[in-house]
Image (tube, grey):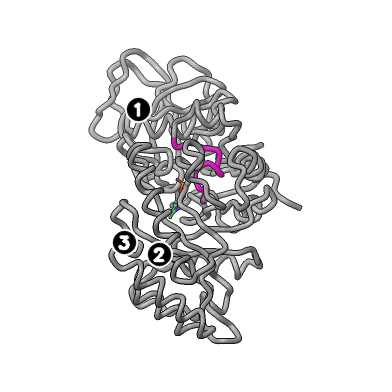
Amino acid sequence: MSAAFREAVVDLDAVTANVARLRELVGTEHVMAVVKANAYGHGAVECARAALAGGADWLGVADVAEGLQLRAAGIEAPVLAWLHDPDEDFAAAVAAGIDVGISSRAQLEAAAAAGAVDAPAFVQLKLETGLSRNGVPASEWEAVVARAHELEQSGTLVVRGLFSHVSNASPADDRAAIAAFSRGIEQAEAAGLRPELRHIAASAAALSLPESRFNLVRLGLAVYGLSPFGADSAAELGLRPAMTLRGRVAAVRRVAADTGVSYDYTYRTTAETTLALVPLGYAEGIPRHASSRGPVSIGGRRYRVSGRVAMDQFVVDVGDAEVAVGDEVVLFGDPATGVPGADDWAEAADTINYEIVTRLGGRLRRSYRGGPA
Ligand SMILES: *Cc1c(COP(=O)(O)O)cnc(C)c1O
């Protein structure tokens, strides 16, 4: 691989292999690959195809617009979208065959209005079970499932699934949410609904709490080879990080001891040394919070960012190593290959691996390796 100036290289074969491995681990009838937010920064269309090749049979997105982007690329697999504009017109979703996640009575009516007897709206009803985000509150659930059944009888709407989402606060909290969800399923069935899908688990619960799996799990982070439980856990689960973030050294200078580096001179050299300039900055989503902390690999050796991460660039003190303009700099990739991982950057920036990969953008080029034929 010859390095590009600023580049995120996504290994689509890793995505495919991760999904296959996850299917094996969870053993559920259905697996939904969550490709919202441009597949956590990895490229939605490319990763959706790679995940389907690995055995995912559903795709999950937050916004309907993200689902429409998949359809525009020719992806025909089932898609669920669950977070909507208050004035969302679900006609486009229904026309594109995208399932609409329903979190309120108003959304249920809007979805039914977008459906017709010869082209019903497919919906999945979301019950709020403790996270305090969206979802129908337990107090309104019986009325909503009764109305959904009525609409189903009228033919404009089909309830394909029931779902919820857990907090990961603790196994006990997640078990309480699962119990509340199970009661919600019983109430829906008592109201006459016969939904084909029931799901509550994302990566963390799916991997750690078997009773959360029902007949579908919604997997995001793990699909990209990262674990909600940290770097060692991803490797132990047999998952491979799909993304390598890299660039090329744009300048090198030899400087004396006590030379200030980058804005505010928060870093000063302690001896004569070589400084390498790396052309990625917070415009690309490199966290400024990782100033003087974020790890990089150059020529197979580990260094840290020296001083402030700026908008377009940061500097690395490489000592007396022979680093030249054009050399490859890896910010993170698969730790099994000796480079830092997204988890190392998460630690350096006091955040989570999810945010490190998802926030990448700016002038970064994405390129792909492998992938389904
Ligand atoms: C983002 C999201 C997921 C995927 O979560 P991961 O922890 O990345 O697996 C699943 N379900 C919902 C509702 C989500 O918003």
List the residue tagged with mark 3: 138
Counting residues from the start of the chain, the first of labels 3 and 1 encountered is: 3
Please, is residue 257 above or below residue 298 in the view?
above
In three-dimensional space, the C-alpha distance between marks 1 and 2, rounded to whole angstroms, equals 35 Å
Residue 137 in sight = yes
Counting residues from the start of the chain, the first of labels 1 and 2 encountered is: 2
- Nearest the viewer among 149 and 372 is 149
SS for callout 3:
helix
- Nearest the viewer among 92 and 301 is 92
- Nearest the viewer among 270 and 142 is 142
Of the residues shown, which amino acid type is indicated by label 3?
Ala
SS for callout 2:
loop
> Which residue range is magenta in the image?
218-228
Give the mark count. Answer: 3
List the residue tagged with mark 1: 293
Counting residues from the start of the chain, the first of labels 2 and 3 encountered is: 2
Of labels 1 and 2, the one closer to you? 2
List the residue tagged with mark 2: 83
